[in-house]
């Protein structure tokens, strides 16, 4: 399993509109091959900051499957205009303990 982690900064005074748009866009990502789950966390200290966590079966399910899909084009149209600055996406694997 791969964990996609993205720190998001939403433009000032657009938080409620963003959360509504994100709920709607969630259907797009949830429909993708290799998708396992996702969650959006709102920062308690910094207004407009969110943490998006998405679990994928493989890295390629996200970087190739989702990013090259028509669903991703819709995802971008619905959500990317809210971000300033544009976020950096990172991927993580669990460390066996």
Image (cartoon, grey):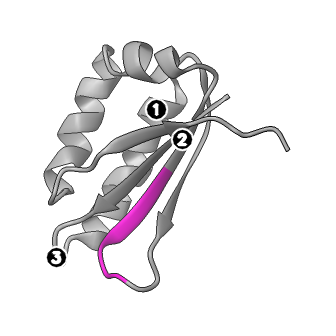
**Could you tell me residue 58's position as x and y percent?**
59, 19
Magenta-drawn stretch contains 72: no
Give the mark nearest the N terminus, 1 or 2: 1
Q: In this rendered view, identify the residue nearer to me: 26 or 92.
A: 92
Q: Is residue 78 above or below residue 42?
A: above
Give the mark nearest the N terminus, 3 or 2: 3
Label 1 residue SS: helix
Count neighbours of disc 2 (C-alpha within 10 A) and say few if under 14, some if 14 to 19, many if 20 or more.
many
Give the Cα distance between marks 3 and 2.
24 Å
**What residue appears at the point 70 percent right and 39 percent down from the top-left corner?**
94
Query: Mark 1–mark 2 contact, CB under 8 Å?
Result: yes
Describe residue 50's horizontal placement relative to residue 17 as left or right.
Answer: right
Q: Is residue 72 above or below residue 10?
A: above
Query: Mark 3–mark 2 contact, CB under 8 Å?
Result: no
Q: Quadrant of residue 9 in the image?
A: bottom left
**Residue 54 tag number:** 2
Give the Cα distance between marks 1 and 3.
25 Å
Give the mark nearest the N terminus, 1 or 3: 3
Q: Quadrant of residue 18 in the image?
A: bottom left
**Could you tell me residue 82's position as x and y percent?**
19, 57
Count neighbours of disc 3 (C-alpha within 10 A) and say few if under 14, some if 14 to 19, many if 20 or more.
few
Query: Badge 1 is on which residue?
Result: 29
**Residue 12 tag number:** 3
**What residue appears at the point 41 percent right and 86 percent down from the top-left corner?**
45
Label 2 residue SS: strand
Q: Which residues are magenta?
A: 46-52
**Residue 55 tag number:** none
Label 3 residue SS: loop
């Amino acid at each position: 399993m791969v964990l996609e982690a993205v720190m998001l900064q939403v433009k000032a005074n657009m938080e409620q509109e963003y959360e509504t748009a994100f709920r709607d866009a969630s259907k797009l990502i949830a429909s993708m091959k290799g998708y396992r789950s996702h969650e959006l966390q709102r920062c308690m200290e910094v207004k407009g900051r969110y943490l998006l966590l998405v679990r994928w079966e493989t890295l390629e399910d996200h970087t190739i499957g989702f990013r090259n899909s028509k669903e991703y084009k819709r995802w971008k149209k619905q959500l990317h205009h809210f971000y300033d600055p544009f976020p950096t996406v990172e991927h993580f694997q669990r460390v066996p303990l």
